[in-house]
Image (spheres, rainbow, N blue to C red):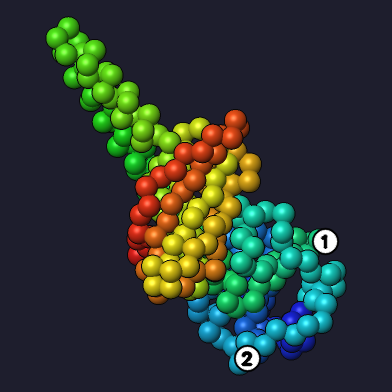
Amino acid sequence: MLCPNCNQPMNLLTADGQTFLHCSNCGSSFFEKNSINKISLETAKKIAEDRLTDEVFGQEKHCPKDGEILKPITDQPQVVSSEITLLRCQKCAGIFAFSEDLVNFKEQQQAKLSYFKAFKKAISFRTIFVLSVLGIISATLVTQGNNFLNYLSSRSQASSIVKKADFYRSGRLLLIFFRTETPFFSKIIFSDKTTGQKLIKMVSETPKTFHQLTTSDLNLDNEIWYQIVLTDNSGKEVKTEVKKIIINNE
């Protein structure tokens, strides 16, 4: 089978229990339906290095299996960000990926997995903490209960507007994740302290509780600060404090 990009023969490789096609000339790969989700980041990096050129040819690209036109995946922004190009066959649902896009996609998947694992742990800890607090409240309800409940309620309301934002770097891409207890529209104001420039990026154009953004519009070697702006259905805005971006290390 010939590579959809450079028209050179593709090799049949097996890794992580998956069999896929790889072009050792331009480094591109073609995966059967859902197979791309089952290979590891380490495998993606390894096969991405197996290439002679990074050139992307301009001709229309066709599926190496059935000849159907490969089209960019644009209908799943929560899975494939606009910064990454993956081409899908409309007939067999196979996915064609250029080497850099494959690595960025797998790094993005790993960052999301790390985020959800951390969030799950945080939820478990918070549940234990709340139960402990409720036990204390029950024991001291007569003397101090009302005051403590009022304090806890105000603190809960303040902290539940926006959860801690997590930042991950994938090459030139910055991945951002955060949650809100209730649905909000959201955007982020970035301030580059090195250049003095500001950038506003829309995150959720419809009210959501899980917010994610991938952008390559920032120089991640500079000192970047951010502020999250949330808007409810009535148009009322809530802003977080301005904070410095701290990138998580995997």
Residue 79 higher or lower than 249, as above or below: above
Label 1: few (<14), some (14–19) or many (≥20) C-alpha neighbours in 10 Å:
few
Which residue is denoted by mark 2 in the rendering? 53
N-terminal of the pair, mark 1 or mark 2, is 2
Report the disc number at residue 91: 1
- Where residue 155 sits in the image (x, y, percent)? 31, 30
- Where residue 91 sits in the image (x, y, percent)? 82, 61
| Quarter of the picture holding the N terminus | bottom right
Q: Residue furthest bottom?
A: 52
Q: Is residue 87 visible?
A: yes
- Where residue 128 sits in the image (x, y, percent)? 28, 30
Q: Residue at x 40, y 34 (%)?
A: 160
Q: Residue at x 71, y 61 (%)?
A: 73
Residue 92 higher or lower than 5, as above or below: above
Label 2: few (<14), some (14–19) or many (≥20) C-alpha neighbours in 10 Å:
few
- Measure the alpha-carbon separation of dots 1 and 2: 29 Å
- Where residue 235 sits in the image (x, y, percent)? 59, 35
Left or right side of 1 for 18: left
Q: Contact (CB < 8 A) between labels 1 and 2?
A: no
| SS under mark 2 | loop
Return the residue nearer the eye: 62 or 241: 241
| SS under mark 1 | loop
Amino acid type, mark 2: Thr
Q: Residue at x 74, y 82 (%)?
A: 5
Left or right side of 224 for 37: right
Residue 4 higher or lower than 238, as above or below: below
Q: Is residue 248 visible?
A: no
Return the residue nearer the eye: 88 or 224: 224
Look at discs 1 and 2 and give the one toward the viewer: 2
Residue 205 higher or lower than 170, as above or below: above
Amino acid type, mark 1: Lys
Q: Quadrant of residue 52?
A: bottom right
